[in-house]
């Protein structure tokens, strides 16, 4: 999962998905948080759809800068930043931040493994109307 999370080196997130982190968490770089608050004000509903790159260093390039961001407490999403704060995953974050070849290799292998997961079909599975809850 740490390698797959590196996919967040490309893409954007809406303010509504990281607002709580900005205003309620302490494991975020102060200057980074201040810059994000300009486009993501505190009142819920205000600026909800404003977009911010998941990787502010190289938002349009697939690289390992995402992990360097985490090391500097500049992970946009809570689920990203916990990777460096958790002893079970912090070592991989540190390794990937300094070893792009290892990250690329592990990411590719994880994508292949994920692609080989057989989906449940028929009565064994379901197509969810909302991904976050069972129909």
Image: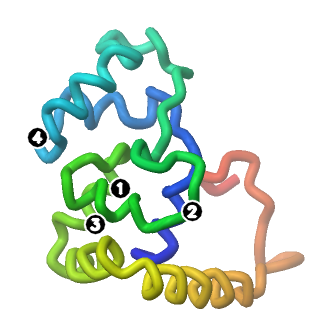
Is 123 placed above or below 105 here? above
Q: Residue at x 77, y 80 (%)?
A: 119
Q: Residue furthest right?
A: 122
Q: Which image quarter: residue 68?
A: bottom left
Figure quadrant of residue 64: bottom left
> Which callout, 2 or 4, points at the residue further toward the start of the chain?
4
- Residue contact at pointers 2 and 1, CB within 8 angstroms: no
> For the residues carrying marks 2 and 4, which lies nearer the camera in this image?
2
* Mark 3 vs 1: CB contact within 8 A: yes
C-alpha separation, residue under disc 4 versus residue under disc 3: 15 Å
Coloring basis for residues:
rainbow
Q: In the depicted view, which residue is nearer to us: 106 or 115? A: 106
59 lies above or below 7? above
- Label 3 Cα neighbours within 10 Å, binned few <14 / some 14-19 / many ≥20: many
In the shown orientation, is residue 122 left or right of residue 110?
A: right
- Residue 33, position as x, y percentages in the image: 23, 30
* Tag 3 residue: 83
Write down the residue under mark 1. Answer: 79
Pointer 4: what residue? 26
Q: Residue 112: x percent and y percent?
A: 68, 87
**x and y, in percent, of residue 134 in the image:** 64, 56
User: Which secondary structure lies at badge 1?
Assistant: helix
- The dot on residue 62 is 2
Dot 4, crowdedness within 10 Å: few (<14), some or many (≥20)? few
Q: Does 88 appear above or below 85? A: below
State how far apart marks 1 and 4 are (Cα).
14 Å
Q: Categorize mark 2 by other alpha carbons within 10 Å: few (<14), some (14-19), many (20+).
A: some
Q: CA distance from mark 2 to mark 4?
A: 28 Å
Q: Earlier in the sequence, mark 4 or mark 3?
A: 4
Is disc 4 placed on a helix, strand or loop?
loop
């Amino acid at each position: 999962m740490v390698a797959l999370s590196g996919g967040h080196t490309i893409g954007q997130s809406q303010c509504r998905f990281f607002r709580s982190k900005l205003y309620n968490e302490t494991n975020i770089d102060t200057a980074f948080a201040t810059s994000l608050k300009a486009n993501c004000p505190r009142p819920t509903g205000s600026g909800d759809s404003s977009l911010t790159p998941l990787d502010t260093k190289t938002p349009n390039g697939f690289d390992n800068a995402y992990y360097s961001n985490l090391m500097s407490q500049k992970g946009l999403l809570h689920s990203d930043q916990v990777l460096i704060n958790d002893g079970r995953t912090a070592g991989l974050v540190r390794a990937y931040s300094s070893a792009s070849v290892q990250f690329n290799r592990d990411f590719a292998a994880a994508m292949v493994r994920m692609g080989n997961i057989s989906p449940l079909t028929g009565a064994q599975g379901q197509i969810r109307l909302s991904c976050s809850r069972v129909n």
